[in-house]
Image (cartoon, grey):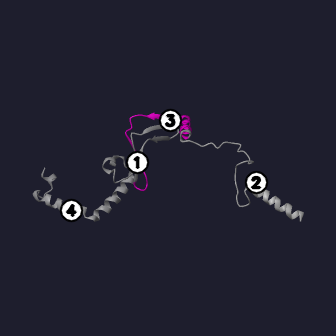
Amino acid sequence: MADAEMLEARQRMIAKRFGGASQSRTGGKGSVRRKKKAVHKTATSDDKKLGSTLKKLGVTNIPAIEEVNLFTNDGKVVHFSNPKVQASIAANTYVVSGPNETKQLTDMLPGIINQLGQDNLEHIKAIADNLQPGGAAPAVEEEDDEGDDGIPDLVDNFEEAA
């Protein structure tokens, strides 16, 4: 009987001291101290690391660039207005930073035709083909027919006459 009483007393003492078996608690009196403080990284430390890496590459600022457009494969354009542009020709590295917007290629089309490459021109042709069945092309043909009424057709070869 003494063993049963002793076991029961131990259970009561454990329950009183540690909150019973149902409550599990971390920290508090008697817990092990944390040895090291958790260090939180900030965005400024990342900027400093990036700046030091760029300095190692030897990038230089390129002044007077008004806009930068990056064309993606899915027909979108990442547009930077008045960006900060840095370059390292030896490392073949270009850094474009600043506020940007992601726009559709069709939204920026009139002003960026001279910047388009061969793959983007094919994308524009596909867009134009999609627009033609909508009825835009026949309206233009009718206007051309009406405009040709005042101009006579060329019958003779004009080079032979000269």
Residue to which mark 1 is pinned = 101
Say if the magenta span includes residue 35. Answer: no
Q: Is residue 152 left or right of residue 32?
A: left
Distance of label 1 from label 3 (alpha carbons): 25 Å
- Judging depth in this view, the residue of 29 and 95 nearest the camera is 29
Q: Is residue 10 left or right of residue 50?
A: right
Which secondary structure, mark 4? helix
Q: Earlier in the sequence, mark 3 or mark 2?
A: 2
Which secondary structure, mark 2? helix
Which of pointers 1 and 3 indicates the residue nearer the eye?
1
Question: Which numbered dot is residue 63?
Answer: none
Please report the bounds of the magenta region as a residue range: 46-75
Which of pointers 3 and 2 indicates the residue nearer the eye?
2
Q: Earlier in the sequence, mark 1 or mark 2?
A: 2
Residue to which mark 3 is pinned = 59
Residue 76 rendering spot, x and y as whole percentages? 40, 53
Q: How many marks?
A: 4
Labels 1 and 4 touching (C-beta < 8 A): no
- Judging depth in this view, the residue of 30 and 15 nearest the camera is 15
Residue to which mark 2 is pinned = 17
Q: Earlier in the sequence, mark 3 or mark 4?
A: 3
Distance of label 3 from label 4 (alpha carbons): 54 Å
Q: In the displayed structure, would residue 113 be above or below residue 82? A: below
Residue to which mark 4 is pinned = 139
